[in-house]
Image (cartoon, rainbow, N blue to C red):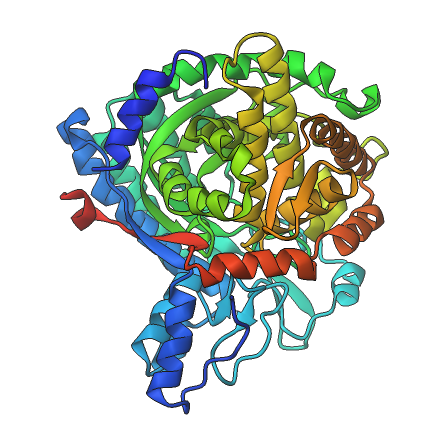
Amino acid sequence: MINKLPCLLLALILICSCGETTETTTHTDSPTKEASLMDRKLEKYVPFKLTTDLSQLEDHHKEMIPILIKAGKIMEELFWYESYGDKAQLMASIKDEKVKEFVEINYGPWDRLDGNSSFVEGIGAKPEGANYYPKDMTKEEFEASDLKSKSDLYTFIRRDKDGKLISIPYHKQFQKSVTEVADLLHQASQLAKDPGLKKYLTLRSKAMLDDEYQASDMAWLDMKENRIDVVIGPIETYEDQLFGYKAAHECYVLVKDMEWSKRLAKYAAFLPELQQGIPVDAKYKKEKPGRDTELNAYDVVFYAGDCNAGSKTIAINLPNDEEVQLQKGTRRLQLKNAMKAKFDKILMPISKSLIDPSQQKHITFDAFFSNTMFHEVAHGLGIKNTINGKGTVRKALKEHASALEEGKADILGLYMINQLHKKGELTNDLKDFYVTFMAGIFRSVRFGASSAHGKANMIRFSFFKKMGAFEYDSEKGTYKVNFDKFQEATEALSAKILTLQGDGDYDGVAALVNEMGKIGPGLQKDLDKLSAAGIPVDIVFEQGTEALGL
């Protein structure tokens, strides 16, 4: 258990309490058959209402939240365009209401928890580059192009009238929408009393209009005492599976738990010391993590866009800008109400099905919270720039960068837990972290190959299996952690990932993904058992001003 947190955990628990198919849905099927298929698909998600204790907020906070949610709803529209294109046209072509509901969850006609398989008749495979690039563009054409801004985070690639590749900045493609968002963020800034929040909202408003986000990222890191927070704009690059260059629009509206955040703040201070101890050659850890690093806990009250598509984020590590990270650091946001929902509704049922009964006592929310938290902290460890002149790790590893980075954060999160446990900063049984981590692999691998987190967990499962980090009882269909070998596997995989990142070894990462990033028949059988038992894969939210009672 995290030192001195039992009472807070009890309070949190009280607060949070107030076989997959790849078939294609057709509109000519009988209603019974179609309903049966869509029912099974919809059952992958369990509903959860996003709320928080509004009594802790002042009136101006309550005025700000609906404004920020309104801005978030515009992020929904922008992400729909990035993910698919014309939402209205797609929805008009679908008659069945359950199919429409599943399309809404997936932001398109592709099942994000089933390898982006199409489930709407007449629509083929999802383009790897989503809607960021021309559908007929090849990788070779893109790489041969002399277009200077082609790999920029905030541009679409299109063709001119002569068929030549051109780039269109987000703020021009979405001019009307981002102008409205900028106005809403300005309105919110006028209500903000916290100076740091006011500055951030003002700068973020401006950034929407010119795609220059670094100043607002810096300001976001400077906020310390704000009760309300918002993460908004084009941020993660998971949706671009062609190159991993293009950022997707999203929004979180958050209410900070001030007491929890104070308790967690101390762990970020260990980053520089932990950076020196990671199990890899010195040249792969020569960078110094930014010291202006915070660790905070929140209730999330609204998700929109990329973070709401398919599997839902339960913790955040931002900004992604490598220059900002090295200069100032990052903030880690633990979304504790969403985290508790996934633990109760998904992880615990999985554990009862797949973890050896003798080790089920080691599945705890404390360990789940800590594993998730230190995953986010561990994003700050390692290296952001290659050691051989290939540029940033993200640019060098292209579409594989996100999956490898998520794998690094998971495995170095365990390294941090080990080190802090040795120092006495974490006081509960180390076995809790290991067994809960193992159970977490089964939870995340169900997100599928289209998810960076899913790929990362599959690679880790295969690597741990190869090193004997767990034992499998084929008769019971359960897994048992081998604690000594689990630690050895953790250190070996940490070194491998950090070396691949530092070398910018694109071919090496591609080989790793190809070798270990696929679900084998044995594991698939166990995952099918979870589906047959009706254990959901993820959560879907009832959210917004009405859910909050505002």
Which image quadrant is residue 15 in? top left
**Closest to the observer, 497 or 84:** 497
Residue 325 falls left or right of residue 16:
right
Foreground residue, 131 or 546?
Answer: 546
Q: How many marks?
A: 0
In-front residue for pair 382/25: 25
* Residue 467 visible in this rendered orientation of the protein: yes
Q: In this view, which residue lies farthest toward the top?
A: 423
State whether residue 286 is above or below residue 412. above
Query: Which residue is at the front of the view, 191 or 51?
Result: 51
Which quadrant: the N terminus? Answer: top left
Q: Is residue 39 above or below residue 485?
A: below
**Horizontal side of residue 25 vs 129, given as left or right:** left
Residue 227 shows in the view: no
Q: Position of residue 290 (x, y in %)?
A: 60, 19
Residue drawn at (84%, 22%) of the image: 281
Where does residue 105 sit, x and y in percent of width and height?
A: 39, 62
Residue at 54% from the left image edge and 47% from the top image edge:
354
The C terminus is located in which quarter? Answer: top left
Q: Residue at x 49, y 56 (%)?
A: 530
Is residue 495 placed above or below 347 in the rendered structure? above
Where residue 544 sits in the image (x, y, percent)? 24, 49
Residue under the point 50% across and 29% down: 362
Measured as percent of width and height from the top left, residue 529 is found at: 52, 59
Residue 314: name its quadrant.
top left
Q: Farthest residue in the front direction? A: 475
